[in-house]
Image (tube, helix red, strand yellow):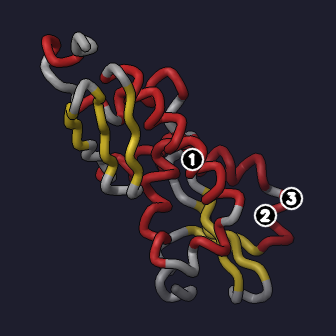
Amino acid sequence: MGSKATAYLEHEAFAQAKARLSNLMDQAVHAHRPQVIDRHRGKEQAVLVSVEDLAMLLEGFSFHPRVSISEGEFVIRLPELGLVAGGESYEGALAELIELVGTQAEDFLDRLDFYMQTDRRGQLAYLLKFALTVPEERYSLFSSAAPPEEARAPQPA
């Protein structure tokens, strides 16, 4: 993507952007207008976009967990991230899944340059969606796969 690809967006040179950061933030956050910031005569570009707008852009990236019950253990598979979690109850398996996704998000975002060069780069949008979701709402990202209430109780041994 070069300057032709971003011709429809407002551009600001890096030096001027530093001096006008407050105004650029207002445009991105309150006016919902992404701001392109150029450096080195447009050779490097970044987009300033509000967290709210980014979260809205990521709405299309939905998790599709698969829940199964085997020998009294609940197993949740998350194909988008290649993760599997388990527990004696659905809630326990879900808690483990959220912990695993959190660990993967932290590692991925800490080593972003590495992962963007691998076949896992497609996971970025899902991990950003998870990271931008407040912790109290993360369970809802995966709750569409909840088993019926009668199957959620631990099975007697």
Name the quadrant containing residue 157: top left
- Secondary structure state at the residue bearing disc 3: helix
Residue 3 location, x and y as percent?
56, 86
Amino acid type shown at disc 1: Ser
Name the quadrant containing residue 144: top left
Choose the circle earlier in sequence order: 3 or 1.
3
Q: Eyeballing the image, is 54 above or below 134?
A: below
Alpha carbons under labels 2 and 1: distance apart: 16 Å
Callout 2 crowding tier (Cα within 10 Å): few <14, some 14–19, many ≥20: some
Residue at 67% from the left image edge and 73% from the top image edge: 113
Marker disc for residue 50 = 1
Q: Eyeballing the image, is 95 above or below 31?
A: above
- Secondary structure state at the residue bearing disc 2: helix
Disc 3 + disc 2, Cβ < 8 Å? yes
Residue at 31% from the left image edge and 55% from the top image edge: 79
Looking at the picture, tell me which residue is in the foreground, 39 or 80: 80
Marker disc for residue 19 = 3
Q: Is residue 96 left or right of residue 156?
A: right
Looking at the picture, tell me which residue is in the foreground, 37 or 146: 146
Q: Is residue 123 left or right of residue 20?
A: left
Residue 86 location, x and y as percent?
38, 34
Amino acid type shown at disc 3: Ala
Residue at 78% from the left image edge and 63% from the top image edge: 17
Residue farthest front in this picture = 157
Residue 4 location, x and y as percent?
50, 88
Marker disc for residue 17 = 2
